Every structure is written in C-alpha cells, then in structure tokens.
Image (cartoon, rainbow, N blue to C red):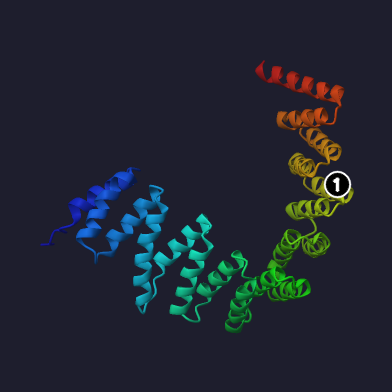
C-alpha cells in the first residue's frame, strides 16, 4: 500500500489556489510549507512561482536565488532557477543582478557555451563591450564554426566602435551559414543604424537585399535607413519597390513610411505616403483619418475636409 504524502493536504490546497488564478492567496500557504520543510525544494519553487504571479518579483527572485545557489553546489547543473533569474532580471532591466547570476553560472560550469553566450549578452546589454568581447572570443575558441558566435563578436566590436572589424565578423558568419546570411547582414545594418552610421547601415542592408531582393521587410528596412540618413526620396523608391512586389501589403507599406516621415517632421512627405496607402486601400478609414490629420497639420484645409467627407461617406455606407 502506497504511503500517503504527509504534505499533500496543504500542498494541494495551495496548488489549487495557484491553478485557479489566486496566487496571492497561495503565497502564505507556500511560505508555511517552506518554513516547516526548508529542505524541500519543490515548496520553495512553488512559492517563487506564486510570488511571481502575484507580481512580487523581488521576493520571487530571492526564492529563485536560494534555489540557484543549490544548483551551483551540485555536479549536475540543472539550470532551472538560473533560467528564471535570467528571465526576471532581463525583464526588470536589472543589469548588475543579471551579470552576477551569469558570472556565477559560467564560473561553476566552465566551458559551457550556452552559459558563456548568455554572459556575453549580459555584458553587452550593460554597455561592457570589452568584457563581452572577451567572452565571445572564448566562445569562438570553443566553437570556431558557430556563426552565431561570430555575429555576437561583431556586435561587441561594433559597440567598441570597430566598424570594419564588426563587418568582417558578420561576413565570416555569413560564409559559414549562407542560408542565414541575409539575416546576419540585416542585424548588422540595424546595429550600424543604432550606432549612428546610416551610410554603413545602408551598405549592409544592400548586401542583405542582394541575397533576398524581393523580401518585403528588408526593402522597408532599407527605406527606413534612408529616411534616417536624410534621403527621403530614395526611401520612397525603396518602399515603392516593396509595394509593387507585394501589392496585398502596399497599404501597410506606405502607412509605415508615412508614420516614420511624420516622426521625422517631414509632414508633406508623410502625407504623400499615407495618400498612397489610402489609394492602395481606399476603404481603410484609419488611412483616411490619418491623412486628414496630416493635411490639417500642413494647413491644407480643403484637402483635409475632402478627406473627412470620404470618411463620412464610407461610414454611412457601412451603416447602411
């Protein structure tokens, strides 16, 4: 006969509350179970989840930290508490806590590529590019044929201002995995743009498009880069190509360009783009309302009024 679990009544009640979406009520029950049975990790884990679901993230992290310290002491590193702490600290933007967890895990499991990659990414997120670079170089020494490590190395080099070396690392990754080369160059272009180098970003995106010339998102990304680089006319050409290759998405394409141009203060060009969106999707009220607002901002009262009358006519048609 199977011996009855002495913890089951209290645990079942707490688990039932958690399953019913009442984690705050489950927390005191789990706390008591943890206090009464400190060596039972499952109770501490359940408490951590209940606290997390109750948005008591600091105390939840403290529970996961206790479990993490136990993980570090074992030969077999399960990494469950580690994963949860990494996720919590990333979501909360606690860079120092994230680095602490990643450093301890990497020290406890030397040579683990996954742990090293997470550590390098944590350093890079915390603007510690030199430390990230050292970690990525270590990763490449462990797995020299892994293209993702070369991409990470390129990101660290870019953060340090070494633009040509960053590009060289991305090219190396693309050579290793040609099937993902376009994605690698797209990421490089985004990195160049965020770092304030639109010309470099444009060149990287053209490499990307040379591999996938008809890709809708890459064409729009090129257009965005051109806008940020002060070339709105060229951006219109890139978006026109995207719209012509993907007619079903033309309205969304032109609307995206219009919003970016408006954010840049280019309201005339923005109105022209949104007008093309309205032409592509003539019954889309959102396009027409946005166009009317842009005309109004430009002082084009007659055009704004005519556009609003189109909205009114479409609305009446829908009602009828």
Q: Is residue 116 left or right of residue 254?
A: left
Q: Residue furthest front?
A: 96
Q: Residue furthest right?
A: 233
Q: Is residue 252 left or right of residue 9?
A: right
Percent x, y of residue 299:
85, 27
Percent x, y of residue 317:
71, 18
User: Relative to 10, is 185 above or below?
Assistant: below
The quadrant in which the C terminus is found is: top right
Out of 199 and 112, give the one closest to the viewer: 199
Residue 243 quadrant: top right
Dot 1 falls on a residue whose secondary structure is helix
Q: Which residue is mark 1?
A: 236
User: Relative to 241, is 197 above or below?
Assistant: below
* Point 24% across, 64% down: residue: 38
Residue 167 quadrant: bottom right
Percent x, y of residue 87:
48, 60
* Point 59% across, 65% down: residue: 126
Q: Is residue 28 left or right of residue 269?
A: left
User: Relative to 143, is 170 above or below?
Assistant: above
Q: Residue furthest left?
A: 1
Q: Is residue 199 left or right of residue 315?
A: right
Percent x, y of residue 64:
38, 62
Out of 295 and 243, give the one closest to the viewer: 295
């Amino acid at each position: 006969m199977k011996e009855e679990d002495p913890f089951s009544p209290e645990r079942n009640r707490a688990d039932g509350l958690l399953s019913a979406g009442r984690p705050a009520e489950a927390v005191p029950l789990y706390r008591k179970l943890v206090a009464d049975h400190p060596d039972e990790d499952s109770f501490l884990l359940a408490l951590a989840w209940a606290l997390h679901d109750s948005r008591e993230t600091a105390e939840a992290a403290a529970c996961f930290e206790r479990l993490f310290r136990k993980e570090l002491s074992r030969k077999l590193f399960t990494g469950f508490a580690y994963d949860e702490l990494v996720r919590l600290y990333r979501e909360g933007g606690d860079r120092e806590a994230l680095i602490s967890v990643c450093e301890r895990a990497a020290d406890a499991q030397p040579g683990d590529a996954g742990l090293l990659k997470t550590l390098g990414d944590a350093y890079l997120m915390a603007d510690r590019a030199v430390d990230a670079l050292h970690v990525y170089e270590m990763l490449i020494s462990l797995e020299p044929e892994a293209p993702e490590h070369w991409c990470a190395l390129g990101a660290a080099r870019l953060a340090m201002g070494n633009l040509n070396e960053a590009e060289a690392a991305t090219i190396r990754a693309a050579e290793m995995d040609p099937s993902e080369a376009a994605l690698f160059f797209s990421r490089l272009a985004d990195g160049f743009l965020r770092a304030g180098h639109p010309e470099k970003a444009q060149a990287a995106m053209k490499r990307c498009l040379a591999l996938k010339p008809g890709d809708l998102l890459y064409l729009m990304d090129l257009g965005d880069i051109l806008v940020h680089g002060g070339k709105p006319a060229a951006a219109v050409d890139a978006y026109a190509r995207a719209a012509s290759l993907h007619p079903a998405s033309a309205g969304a394409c032109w609307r995206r360009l219009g919003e970016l141009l408006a954010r840049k203060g280019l309201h005339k060009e923005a109105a022209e783009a949104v007008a093309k969106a309205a032409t592509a999707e003539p019954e889309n009220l959102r396009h027409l309302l946005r166009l009317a607002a842009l005309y109004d901002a430009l002082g084009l009262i007659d055009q704004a009024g005519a556009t609003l009358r189109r909205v009114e006519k479409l609305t009446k048609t829908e009602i009828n």
